[in-house]
Every structure is written in C-alpha cells, then in structure tokens.
Amino acid sequence: MKATVRLGILGLLVLICAAFPAQAQELGPGFTKVKDGIYVYAAKEGNSTCSVVVTEDGPVIIDTCQRPPDTHRLMAGVKKLTDKPVRFVIDTEIHNDHTFGHWVFSPPAMVINAEGAGAAMKKQFDPKRVEKLAAESPEMAEAIKGYKMIVPQIEYRNQMTINLGERTFELIYLKNVHSEADTAVWLPKERVLFAASAANVKSIINLRPFVRIPDVLASYKLMKSLNPEIVVPGHGAVSTTKIFDEYEGFYNLLMKRVGEMVAQGKSPDEIKKELKMPEYADWADQNNLPQNITVAYESLKK
C-alpha cells in the first residue's frame, strides 16, 4: 500500500510540474517571460533582444543575440524548456547584433528572413570580427569556438506564415525601416509582436542612408493595426504599442523642424548644427541625431 501511495505522489508531482511552465528566473538572469512558452532574453539594457517561442513541434528562436556568450545562455535556457531541437531561427534584421549567433542553432534549425537578407549579411561581414572578439577574454574565446557564418536558408517576399504545432507565426516585411531586410514577427493567437528595430525604447535609432521616414511611419501604422497586447522591440524592454506612438511623435516633429529649416534655405550641414530636439533629451544614443536629420532631409526631397 505504501509503495502505491508513493508512486501516486510522484505521478502527481510530475503532473504539477507539467502544468506550470518554467518561470523566467529558472532560465537564468536576463530572461523575461512574456506569455506561457514565450521568453525574451537581453543581457543588459541596450543590448539586442533574442527570444524563444516554445511549440509542441519544437522551439523557434527570434534573433540570436548580440554577443556569443549570450547566444549560449539563450540556448541553455531553451534546453531547460524543451528537449526538442530548434526548428527555425527568424531574423528581424540583418545586422550582427541580431544574427551573429546563428551557428549555435543552425543546423538543425532553418534560418528565415526577408528577401535580400543573405546578400546583405555577406556584404557587411567582417572576416576579422571573430579574431577581435576572441581576443577580448577567455570567456569570449570559448564562446566563439566553432563559429561559422550562417545566412538565411529561406528568404520570403512580403509575407510568410509558419504553422508549427499549436502556434502561428506571421512574418511581415518592413520596407526601408532599419536594415536591408527587416521582419516583424506576429503571433496572432497570443497577440505578441516582435517589432524588429523599427522602434526601440526611448533611443535615437541609427538610421541607415536608405531609410525613409515615411516608410518608418507606415510600419508603425501597420504594426499598430494588428492590435498587439505585447510588443518586443529589437532593443530595450518588453513594451506595448506606446513605443510606436513615441517614435511617431519624434519623427513627425523632426520632419517638421527639418522642413521649416529647408524652407528657410538652410543647407543640410547648417540644419545638423542648429536643429535641436530638447523634448527627447532623455533618449539614449543622442549621437545618432545628425544621421536622423540627414535621413529626414532626404525623405523630404521625395
């Protein structure tokens, strides 16, 4: 009888453990639980976010972290959540701080991003980066062992839907918002949106020369129309659609001020010297303001 009772208790414990998914603190520092089976990892404030979405058919990774030690910590967290292999890695952009860690997951995972991502990654690849990183510290040298550049094996055009287990992932191309191939990842059942680096959290984004502010504003309108409950930015803490409202305010004011100075006959260099945005003085990365002014100026020429 005692043996029977003991086995019953053990069985009950197994059921209880299965009923309550792992909490973020169980995965280690830096993890935030967004919803059941959805976790975001960021080593420190300002670092790119990288995430795991667990499904019945295996986990999906969204971006592969800023630095190799963080990529391995993300993988360690994944292994605490499931013993199934990673099925897909979805990139929200092409830059190293989001894509460098692919080799930790692929193979077996298939990497996905929008059309043109692979070519853009190869173009911006620095072959000396591995050597430079390895020289930083013994921890980094160990973390980067086995590195191999992995570009997306799957590139989609405009939109792509992945049905995996109980979850649906909708991939949406965002044109001219940050990198050469930006993808918003929408989980409609869970109402969780991974918003790439179109909007971060109170920081002036490093806009590349090809970015156009009307396209950026259009991306906010599109993403808000999905009515997400939770928004995961490319950098910064998990948020809501309020980050889109904040950036809309910033870019609309920037465009207005640049437009007024253009009407006064001022040159781009004069505008960069004179234009101030005191309303956003508390935002990080103020050094990116001149480039934002240049992009605003070019956007107005259209």
Image (spheres, rainbow, N blue to C red):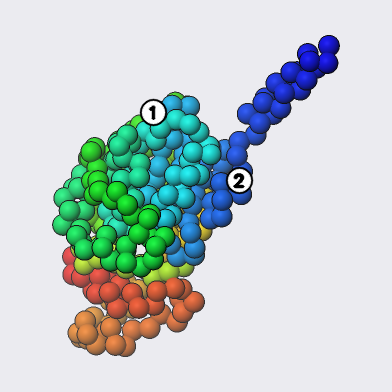
As helix, strand or loop, the secondary structure at mark 1 comes to strand
Tell me which residue sits at (27%, 60%) in the image: 130
The numbered dot on residue 81 is none
Mark 2: which secondary structure? helix
Q: Nearer the viewer, residue 110 or 192?
A: 110
Point out residue 70 in the picture as x, y percentages from the top left corner. 43, 55
Q: Position of residue 58 (x, y in %)?
A: 43, 30
N-terminal label among 1 and 2:
2
Residue 132 falls in image quadrant: bottom left
Q: Is residue 82 above or below residue 209?
A: above
Asked whether the viewer can see residue 185, the reply is no
Say if residue 6 shows up in the picture: yes
Quadrant location of the N terminus? top right
Q: Which residue does the image show at 33% across and 84% down from the upper left? A: 275
Mark 1 and mark 2: span between their CA atoms? 28 Å
Residue identifier under label 2: 26
**What residue type is disc 1 on?**
Asn
In this rendered view, identify the residue nearer to me: 191 or 148: 148
